[in-house]
Amino acid sequence: MKYRSLGTTNEKLPLIGQGTWTYGENQSEALEEIKALRYGIENGLTLIDTAEEYAKGGAERIVAEAIKDCRGDIFLTTKVSAKNCSYKGVIEACEKSLERLNTTYIDLYLQHWPSKEHEVEETMRAMTYLVEKGLVKFIGVSNFTPELIMEAQSAIGHHVLSCNQVGYHLNDRRVENDVIPYCQKNEVTVMGYSPFGYAPQFFGGVGFPEQGTKGRQVLDEIGGKYGATAYQVALNWILRHEGLITIPKAKNAAHIKSNLEALELTLSDEDLQVIDTYFPKTNEGMSLVKY
């Protein structure tokens, strides 16, 4: 397994983690989801990302079952919903997440989205309280622009803002223009979610290139050089940035095995130029969205 540091901390995280969005939504899939997480853990994917919003806490319960006998080996990330970002709301949400996760601490606690109702300063005050109480080890944010990251960093004083989790994939490269450069300069880890595209209900349904499209053909051709799939090429492409890790969701062992194999690729400069041609970067930065 390959690792990168979490921000300015001494914590080392695997380049690929395990996302759990949609976990816990269907009880009939619970055992398969637990097995998938266990398979990933056994193969070095010890970073697990979840959130109180996922299946209304159901994903956290799935994670709790998967890590119950190996909690000490896991780097556990969860997120507080924007609607719960008042000072009191953050603390109560954290306590409920701890209960669902059946753990006494969260390794990395993130503000899931910028909040319409609560100022960043108020949310971060609660985050620092949780760190000082030992309930949270590291503070992070998600879907924050550089301007909001600066607000959060200012609000936490001597504490460290170690991570910004953002959507990042071939069809949405906006974070390359502002978020990634800012985070690299300020030693904030970028944790890229949805590396294969967003679900239809989000961001206009921007997703992975469909079979038969020119972009997909290009990824298939590049993958063919390495005995890899288009998905493995796309995942490896994301990890070319220093200070970036990614958290693809995988619902079964086969998906996780495929993600792990993506780490073994070394895309040539020529291949990267071809990808840039078919998946060009625009000049716009990341949009600010508040919930």
Image (cartoon, grey):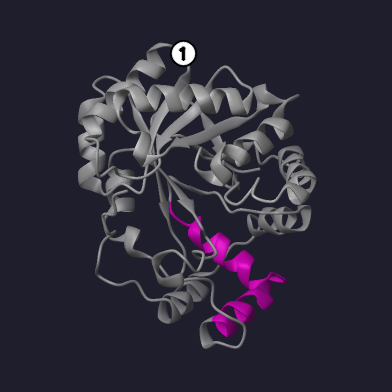
* Residue 196 x/y as whole percent: 55, 64
Q: Is residue 58 magenta?
A: no
The image shows residue 269, relative to residue 60, as above or below, that is: below
At 52% from the left edge and 75% from the top edge, which residue is drawn?
A: 271
State the predominant SS element of the stretch in magenta. Answer: helix
The quarter of the displayed image where residue 162 is located: top left
Q: Is residue 232 magenta?
A: yes
The image shows residue 24, relative to residue 214, as above or below, that is: above
The image shows residue 122, relative to residue 178, as above or below, that is: above
> Quick check: 34 left or right of 167?
right
Give the mark count: 1
* Residue 222 x/y as whole percent: 60, 77
One can see residue 85 in this view: yes
The quarter of the displayed image where residue 178 is located: bottom left
How crowded pointer 1 is (Cα within 10 Å; few <14, some 14-19, many 20+) is rated as: some
Judging depth in this view, the residue of 129 and 258 nearest the camera is: 129
Q: Amino acid at mark 1?
A: Gly
Q: Which residues are magenta?
A: 216-241
One can see residue 9 in this view: no
* Residue 84 x/y as whole percent: 37, 34
Q: Secondary structure at mark 1?
A: loop
Residue position marked by numbered label 1 in the rendering: 134
At 72% from the left edge and 71% from the top edge, which residue is drawn?
A: 227
The image shows residue 105, relative to residue 188, as above or below, that is: above
* Residue 236 x/y as whole percent: 56, 60
On-image quarter of the N terminus:
top right
